[in-house]
Structure formats: C-alpha cells, structure tokens
Amino acid sequence: VLSRAKTIKLHGYPFYEESIPIPEADAGRLTVLLSSKTTFRRRDGKKRCSGYSPEYGVEWKADGDSTRALICLECAEVKLFGTESELYCDLSQEAKPSLESLLGRYREDRTSATASP
C-alpha cells in the first residue's frame, strides 16, 4: 500500500503524506494520554515482534513548540521527539489498549497514518 501512495519520512520511518484530521474530543483524549507519565515505562528491549515499526505518527504543538510521537502498537513502543529531546520507551500495559481503541478508528483507510491533533 505504501508503494501506491505519497509518503514522507518522519525521523526515518515512512508515513502517508496526507494527515488524518482528528476531532477535537479525540485530540484532547490523545493529548491527555500521551502527556501522562503512567503511559510510558522504561524500555526493556525484549520483544516478540518483528521490531519497531511505527503505525501512527501524532504531532501536537503548544506554546510554539512541537512534539511528535511515533507509536508502534505491535511491540508497544513509542519514540517521542521534542524540540530539545528524544525518548524511546515502552507503553504501559494500561496505556496500550487505550491507544489501540483511540487510534484504531483512524486506521480503517490506511496501514500507516499521521495525525495532527
């Protein structure tokens, strides 16, 4: 599917060029979830998947700064990129199903997507 659509690279990973609009209510839930310390835990490196390959790219802006989260739900890992820092961590067991439920609604038309709440 990626070979037939216009793509861009975000931090070295392919995503569809066209963003998916997210309604304000979902954007708020996503911001709360991705801003919570309980969403993330130290990366343990032991996975049974085929390796980190993010399915979702989420970007939000506050006070002129931009933060991007590249989320791999298969292996429950996320890479966060801020203006001055980066973080590579695992999703908590509680956060993964919440993200799957929230982001799953936007997966219908694509296998990878970027979203800008």
Image: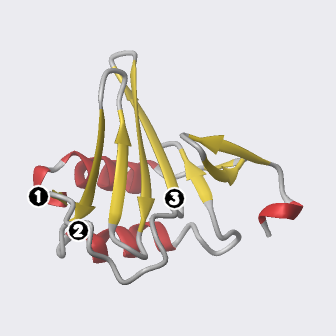
Q: Position of residue 100 (x, y in %)?
A: 39, 74
Crowd band around label 1 with a 10 angstrom C-alpha radius: few (<14), some (14–19), many (20+): few
Q: Is residue 40 left or right of residue 66?
A: left
Task: Please give the label number shown on residue 56.
Answer: 3
Local crowd size for mark 2, using a 10 Å CA cut-off: few (<14), some (14–19), many (≥20): some
Residue 44: image quadrant is bottom left
Residue under the point 34% across and 63% down:
77
Q: Position of residue 80 (x, y in %)?
A: 35, 43
Mark 1 touches mark 2? (CB < 8 Å): yes
The answer to which of 90 and 28 lies nearer the viewer is 90
Place of residue 25 in the rendered image (x, y in percent of width and height, measured from the top left): 38, 54
- Sequence order check: which comes first, mark 3 or mark 2? 3
Q: Is residue 7 above or below residue 98?
A: above
- Chain-order first, disc 3 or disc 1: 1
Task: Specify which label sits upstream in the sequence, 1 or 2.
Answer: 1
Residue beneath label 1, please?
38
Q: Residue at x 46, y 70 (%)?
A: 51
Scheme by which the image is coloured: secondary structure
Which element type, helix, strand or loop, lies under badge 3? Answer: strand
**Could you tell whether 15 is left or right of 28 in the image?**
right
Q: CA distance from mark 1 to mark 2?
A: 8 Å
